[in-house]
Image (spheres, rainbow, N blue to C red):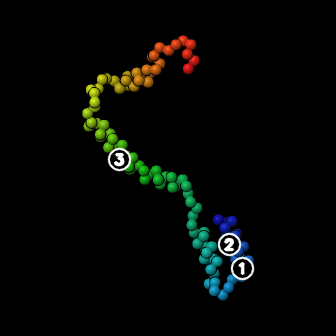
Amino acid sequence: MDKLQRKLIAVARAHAPGSEVPYAFEKRIMARLSEHPALDHWALWAQALWRAVAPCVAIMLLLGVWSLFTPSAKAPSGDLSQEIENTLLAAVDQDQPADSTW
């Protein structure tokens, strides 16, 4: 902002004001330039994220209700934590050759 102000003042000093320039025109222009605050990028991000809260919550609730009322393809077979553990450790349980370096 200061750099722009210095450039404008330098140009204004280089050219003498004519009779068609209104009184205190440069002061009004400088006042308008200082009125606009700097752009705050963090505030823009925060505003966008807060606007996204409502649609995300609505989608979450819809998917939660859908998962509760949709009949599963197979009957529940037991403890979900045990099923996840068996799935994640399936590769470890397989017999691997002793000379494998993976």
Dot 2: element? helix
- Return the residue at label 3: 58
- Mark with earlier residue (1, 2): 2
33 relative to 6 in the view: left or right: left
Tell me where residue 100 appears, x and y as whole percent.
Answer: 55, 16
Question: Which residue corresponds to the image point at 44% horizontal and 51% vertical from the top-left?
Answer: 50
Q: Amino acid at mark 2?
A: Leu
Q: Earlier in the sequence, mark 2 or mark 3?
A: 2
Q: Which numbered dot is residue 8?
A: 2
Q: Quadrant of the N terminus?
A: bottom right
- Residue 40: x and y in percent read 55, 57
User: For this rendering, which residue is in front, 100 or 6?
Assistant: 100
Residue at x 72% of width, y 77% of height: 13
Q: Secondary structure at mark 3?
A: helix
Q: Residues within 10 Å of mark 3 (few under 14, many from 20)?
A: few
> Where's residue 5, x and y in %?
67, 69
Residue found farthest to the right? 14
Q: Amino acid at mark 1?
A: His
Labelled disc at residue 38: none
Q: Which residue is mark 1?
A: 15
Q: What is the tally of numbered marks visible in this picture?
A: 3
